[in-house]
Image (cartoon, rainbow, N blue to C red):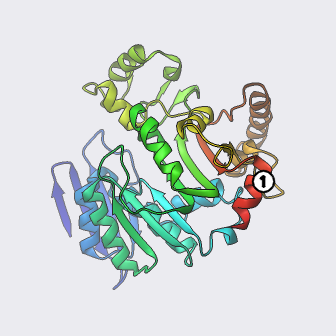
């Protein structure tokens, strides 16, 4: 099947009764994602993803769920150093900003005895998420729609874990101030907020939105001008608010901790240290996820990052991966989080 769309061409080829190959050929300048993937999705689900994500991103969206080297690898590398997999079983997990449901499917697959609740603002994304759920038949997975960008669904309840995967950077400043305290109130005492793939606000190269070096150090007005004029990603007509929505500013650990608002002694947030013996600190979490190439250079960078962390109190890497405990102190929080 060959589908011609305004933004490119997609070819869908049956490999067997249950496998298909999807090849995407977006228009020039829009190829920002994998162009080919294999999937067990039915044709109806592939077409729904294509309608929502477009030609350039259809294979990326499929791979997020069906490729173990995508979101699942991120979760294993970014979260499991802090929390043992057994500690998730039988718990209640909120996948906030679940998008089209790929992250929720991965969580349901990794922790089949846990209750997973996906929350998303976009109605069209949720339609795809529900199609994915019906395809897999996951019974302990449900989805709710947020009524607004600064509000949460009614009757959400309490959770042992809240996952924000590639979400925080897309919240506008006002949403961070109003939404994060509400989210925090739905985390049980001793629970954990798990956050990853949020770009570091002050990393020298802004790879997430603009692909430009040093733009993170510019004031907002100059950063906006540089993004529109210098980026190769067709940002010439973007407003500053739309660039913030795309994630241009990222975040720091301090901002994320402060965003949950005033906390009492039994709800104070603090960064958790890695639990597994092979990890000495958050820098090791970053290092362990790297590939084997240029190992000597990466080892030198690891030691430099440790110095920066001691001096500035931040893990100065491209993307943050954090576990934030809700309790009275890191040692007590972590023990509670792991034992719940």
Instruction: Residue 70: tell me if it is visible.
Output: no
Please state the horizontal and vertical placement of residue 214, each as a whole percent of the image: 53, 20
> Is residue 324 found left or right of 36 in the rendered image?
right
**What quarter of the picture does the N terminus occupy?**
bottom left
The relative height of residue 92 versus residue 32 in the rendered view (above or below) is: below
Please state the horizontal and vertical placement of residue 100, each as a whole percent of the image: 35, 60
The relative height of residue 135 versus residue 199 in the rendered view (above or below) is: below
* Quadrant of the image occupied by residue 312: top right
Of helix, strand and loop, which one carries label 1? helix
Question: Disc 1 marks which residue?
Answer: 332
Please state the horizontal and vertical placement of residue 35, each as a whole percent of the image: 37, 55
Q: Residue at x 45, y 35 (%)?
A: 177
Q: How many marks?
A: 1
Q: Residues within 10 Å of mark 1 (few under 14, many from 20)?
A: some
Q: Of 9 and 108, which appears nearest the observer?
A: 108
Please state the horizontal and vertical placement of residue 30, each as a whole percent of the image: 30, 42
From this viewpoint, which residue is outermost toward the bottom?
17
The relative height of residue 269 versus residue 316 in the rendered view (above or below) is: below
Q: Of 210 and 220, which appears nearest the observer?
A: 220
Q: Residue at x 45, y 37 (%)?
A: 176
Q: Of 233 and 266, which appears nearest the observer?
A: 266
> Is residue 269 found left or right of 244 in the rendered image?
right
Q: Of 246 and 10, which appears nearest the observer?
A: 246
């Amino acid at each position: 099947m060959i589908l011609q769309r305004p933004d490119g061409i997609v070819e869908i080829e049956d490999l067997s009764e249950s496998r298909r190959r999807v090849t995407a050929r977006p228009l020039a300048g829009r190829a920002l994602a994998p162009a080919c993937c294999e999937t067990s999705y039915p044709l109806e689900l592939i077409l729904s993803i294509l309608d929502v994500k477009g030609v350039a991103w259809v294979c990326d969206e499929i791979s997020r769920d069906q490729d173990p080297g995508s979101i699942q690898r991120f979760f294993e590398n970014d979260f499991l150093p802090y929390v043992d997999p057994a500690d998730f079983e039988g718990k209640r997990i909120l996948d906030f900003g679940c998008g089209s449901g790929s992250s929720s499917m991965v969580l349901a697959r990794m922790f089949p005895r846990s209750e997973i609740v996906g929350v998303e603002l976009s109605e069209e994304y949720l339609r795809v998420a529900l199609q994915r759920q019906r395809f897999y038949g996951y019974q302990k997975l449900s989805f709710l729609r947020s009524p607004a960008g600064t509000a949460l669904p009614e009757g959400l309840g309490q959770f042992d874990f809240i996952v924000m995967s590639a979400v925080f950077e897309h919240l506008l400043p006002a949403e961070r101030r109003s939404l994060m305290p509400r989210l925090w109130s739905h985390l049980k005492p001793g629970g954990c907020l798990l956050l990853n793939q949020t770009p570091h606000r002050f990393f020298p190269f802004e790879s997430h939105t603009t692909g430009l070096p040093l733009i993170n150090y510019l004031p907002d007005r100059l950063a906006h001008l540089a993004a529109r004029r210098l980026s190769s990603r067709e940002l010439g007509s973007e407003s500053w608010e739309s660039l913030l929505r795309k994630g241009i500013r990222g975040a720091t650990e301090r901002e994320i901790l402060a965003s949950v608002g005033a906390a009492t002694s039994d709800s104070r947030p603090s960064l958790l240290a890695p639990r597994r013996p092979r990890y000495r600190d958050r820098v090791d979490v970053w290092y362990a996820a790297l590939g084997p190439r240029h190992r000597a250079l990466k080892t030198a960078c690891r030691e430099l990052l440790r110095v920066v962390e001691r001096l500035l109190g931040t893990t100065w890497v491209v993307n943050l991966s954090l576990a934030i405990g809700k309790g009275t102190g890191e040692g007590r929080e972590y023990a509670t989080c792991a034992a719940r």
